[in-house]
Amino acid sequence: MKIFFYLSTCSTCKRIMETLPLDSRVSLRDMKQNPISENELETLKALSGSYESLFNKRAQLYKQRDLKNKQLSEDDYKDLLLEHYTFLKRPALVLENQLFIGNASKTVEAAKKALNEQP
């Protein structure tokens, strides 16, 4: 699986897309238009170790629902990730058995390196 999950309305995602050497081998996926499937989410969880690590705690819905003051289980995180696209940290790049998620400069640089090393 080689997929780049992003939001077309997110300026940070757009900026990162422009800096990454994404070619035709990587499927581009606007999460708003085509939300993540349960199988894809399971793959991301297997690569990251937990649903919580995939979860965007900066999402407006997170604040609106006051989720920071609730004890969320892994099942809660999974349900929320499947419920609404904004709960997935973005962008997320899956390269076979590697996951690069979020917009930290270290993550983006590691993704660039991995993409350049792809056959």
Image: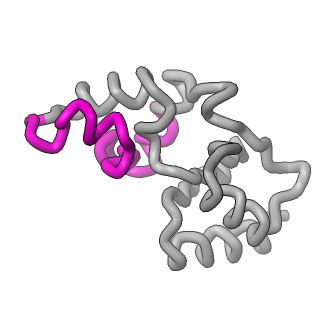
Q: Which residue lies furthest to the right in this view?
A: 24
Is-magenta flag for residue 43?
yes
Q: Residue furthest front?
A: 64
Left or right position of 44 against 30: left
| Residue shown at 35% from the left, 51% from the top | 58
- Residue 28 image-quadrant placement: top right
Front in this rendered view, residue 31 or 3? 31
Please say if 47 is above or below 37: below
The secondary structure that most of the magenta stretch takes on is helix
| Residue shown at 52% from the left, 65% from the top | 103
Left or right position of 22 against 16: right
Left or right position of 116 against 83: right
Report whether residue 106 is seen: yes
Please say if 39 is above or below 29: above
Front in this rendered view, residue 71 or 100? 71
Left or right position of 18 against 47: right
Q: Position of residue 6 (x, y in %)?
A: 64, 46
Q: Quadrant of the C terminus?
A: bottom right
Magenta extent: 42-71
Q: Position of residue 60 (x, y in %)?
A: 37, 41
| Residue shown at 47% from the left, 37% from the top | 86
Report whether residue 5 is seen: no
Front in this rendered view, residue 114 or 83? 83
Q: Where is residue 40 in the image (x, y as percent from the top left)?
A: 56, 31
